[in-house]
Image (cartoon, helix red, strand yellow):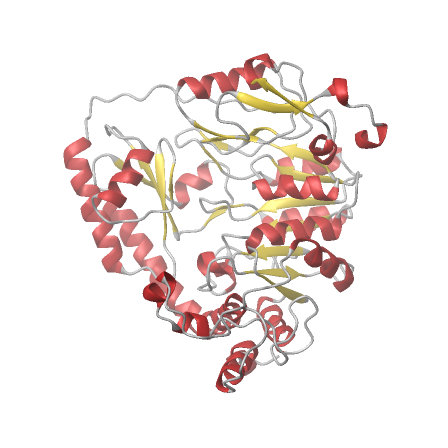
Amino acid sequence: MKKSEQEKTPYVDALKKYLKGKYTGFDVPGHHQKPLHTELSKLYTSRIYKYDVNAPRGLDNYMNPTSVIKEAQDLWADFTGAKRARFLVNGSTSGILIMLLSCLKADDKIILPRNVHKSVINGLVLSGASPVFIMPEIDLCTEIVNQISFENWKKAIDENLDAKAIFIINPTYFGATCDLEKIVKYAHSKNMLVLVDEAHGTHFYFNDKMPINAIKAGADMSTLSVHKSGGSLTQSSVLLINNDNITDYMVSKSVNLITTTSPNNTLIASLDAARKFMVFNGQKILDRILEIAKFAQSEISKIKGFKVRAREHFLKNGAYDFDETKLVIEIDKLKLNGFDIYNLLKDKYKIQIELAETYLFLCILSIGTTKKDIIKLIKALKSISSKYYDENIKYEDHHYFKSFPTIFCRPRTAFHAPLKVVNYKDALNEVSKEMIMIYPPGIPIIIPGERFSKEVIDQLEYYEKINTKVLSDHKDGKVSVIDFENWNNSEDKK
């Protein structure tokens, strides 16, 4: 397909045509595109209702696209180099679930990093697959996880030659990438599929100075959160399929299983429009963003109390390459932690950053970032430094647990087993029904189907002591475990 074909926006054009028809509606949504006077219309104007249509004739069928949605998807596939593409209206969470459901059956084995997104664990529950975890490299300065080396991927693959697939996070939330091409090639040589969580890497496809993207590296499937760095609306993503053996039937049945039957047409249109915009503007805009990133790194590094951790730092801590659009700022000798700075920047300086951890915070630079925005951030950090920097501050030693518990049963088996709730201090040798994650460093301490060990309990006790946020089913020190006394149905244990 010629680049001139990328000028097309088939779904946007069809939506425009439908709206010009000025149809009288007796379908859903119930507002029938009328200008309702609600609190929402006061915020967006009543035109928001005009553009909210369902899926009438002419706008194609999201679940089984044959016309304008398919054309828009094909344009995405063509530009990215994938064999096929599917639009997602439930974010990359749905993309991850669809990848796992399309490629794995009950009892299939998959090799994956320990720091996967929680949707991956949910995908294991739905598919019935069995995980083999690898621990990524941990950055001892910032308490974040980076990547897994090719050597460690090779070792895990060689030790699990019966695995059906491997699952790779590339890039990580903080911009670290792996030797993706080499890992893909080796996994394929052992007849394993390669699935990639590329949620934070959409922009890799639109600028040649970015790290290699999953499709160019030869991966079989990848999910892109286009809304994160590609200019579409929140919740809109794209699934890329790059293997003819992963059939439309396999993908479609998975899409139908987990996706709404009432997709928002505005999200679909935004994916169509974002692709055209990025094809013709992405290289230039992202070149500018990389220049802004270098300016930000240089200027912020001059401010007492802050250390920018960029490419050189990440490469020393387990990454193969680094996404410079991620502005990772470590805190040094400040009377504040990362969470304090997050709140202070928002409340006092009217700056919204992406996230905070105990020892750092993250700013994402993307196509909407301007140099003026960076200058505002620099001024705010200088102000914070003048008030809270103290060269005599000493942080307590960082604390790490680098092992994970033994698996008793598959996540799906644990999910369906009877529930018992106990205090985590009394959970020794119990089998978890839930996933418990700690931030930082963001690695699951335990997932469904794993046994509570003394180390797991010690970890929870330690993080409770230092008041670190625990993500779990309960907020009172309780945990969900399997009730073995009431687990009599052998079918549930399969």
Percent position of residue 48, x then y: 42, 70
- Residue 87 seen in the current view: yes
Does residue 202 appear left or right of residue 155 in this picture?
left
On screen, 199 above or below 432?
below
Q: Nearer the viewer, residue 255 or 38?
A: 38
Residue 283: name its quadrant. bottom left
Residue 342: name its quadrant. top left
Percent position of residue 384, x then y: 19, 38
Q: Residue at x 21, y 36 (%)?
A: 304
Q: Nearer the viewer, residue 21 or 455?
A: 21
Where, quadrant-wise, is the N terminus in this rendering? bottom right
On screen, 260 above or below 31?
above
Q: Residue at x 70, y 47 (%)?
A: 186
Residue 280: name its quadrant. bottom left
Does residue 334 appear left or right of residue 186 in this picture?
left
Residue farthest to the right? 490
Q: Residue at x 56, y 17 (%)?
A: 424
Does residue 430 appear left or right of residue 141 in this picture?
right
Percent position of residue 33, x then y: 48, 75
Where, quadrant-wise, is the C terminus in this rendering? top right
Q: Residue at x 44, y 40 (%)?
A: 314
On screen, 403 above or below 379?
above
- Residue 209 seen in the current view: no
**Number of marks present in the image shown:** 0
